């Protein structure tokens, strides 16, 4: 997994440089970053439920970030992909989660034909560890987004 410093640099560059908000356009900046903060919080809730054996992963169907940034956007603008400088959830613990289930729990994966989606949950201690890593990763992204929001507020 990438370092918090790497993630901070990527997210800082995206919100402060690539979006090209003028120094006086604090309202647009705050709208975008507040939206992303809320989406990351939703993803944290999802993974918290999974870690506590009260939820399941339905991929992009129950991920607030995927629901907002997936589809035609191909994850463009998603703070997770921006943080790790990758498309989608590559280079995140989610990639390990998916690999682990495909290779160690294939028979435990529930496939929903109507949704055309695999549904996964914690099956073993390794699953729990990977889910916890994903949760901590998302908490790090949230922490960085909140610090960038605070930094913009100080600059205004």
Image (cartoon, rainbow, N blue to C red):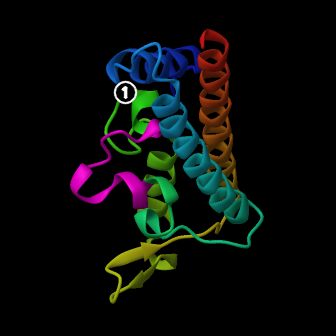
| Badge 1: residue crowd in 10 Å (few <14, some 14–19, many ≥20) | some
Residue at 60 percent of width and 10 percent of height: 155
Find residue 148 and report its image quarter.
Answer: top right
Find residue 150 and report its image quarter.
Answer: top right
> Which residue reaches farthest front?
24
> Which residue reaches farthest right?
52
Range shown magenta: 66-80
Q: Position of residue 46 (x, y in %)?
A: 63, 61
State whether residue 31 is above or below residue 39: above
Residue at 46 percent of width and 12 percent of height: 23
> What secondary structure is the magenta-colored segment mainly?
helix
User: Any magenta on residue 131?
Assistant: no
State whether residue 143 is above or below residue 23: below
State whether residue 26 is above or below residue 99: above
Q: Which residue is mark 1?
A: 85
Relative horizontal placement of residue 6, taking residue 137 as reference (left or right): left
Task: State which quarter of the image contains the C terminus.
Answer: top right
Helix, strand or loop under label 1: loop
Disc tally is 1
Residue nearer the viewer, 98 or 54: 54
Residue at 49 percent of width and 17 percent of height: 12
Q: Position of residue 35 (x, y in %)?
A: 53, 45
Residue at 71 percent of width and 65 percent of height: 49
Relative horizontal placement of residue 13, taking residue 113 as reference (left or right): right
Q: Position of residue 11 (x, y in %)?
A: 47, 23
Q: Position of residue 111 (x, y in %)?
A: 40, 82
């Amino acid at each position: 997994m990438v370092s918090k410093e790497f993630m901070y640099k990527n997210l800082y560059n995206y919100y402060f440089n690539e979006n090209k908000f003028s120094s006086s356009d604090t309202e647009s900046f705050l709208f975008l970053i507040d939206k992303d903060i809320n989406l990351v919080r939703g993803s944290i809730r999802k993974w918290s439920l999974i870690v506590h054996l009260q939820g399941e992963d339905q991929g992009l169907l129950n991920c607030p970030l995927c629901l907002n940034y997936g589809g035609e956007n191909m994850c463009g603008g998603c703070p997770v992909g921006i943080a790790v400088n990758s498309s989608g959830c590559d280079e995140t613990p989610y990639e390990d989660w998916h690999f682990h289930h495909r290779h160690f729990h294939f028979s435990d994966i529930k496939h929903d034909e109507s949704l055309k989606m695999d549904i996964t949950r914690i099956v073993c201690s390794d699953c729990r560890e990977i889910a916890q890593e994903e949760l901590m990763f998302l908490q790090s992204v949230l922490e960085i987004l909140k610090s960038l929001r605070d930094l913009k507020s100080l600059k205004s």
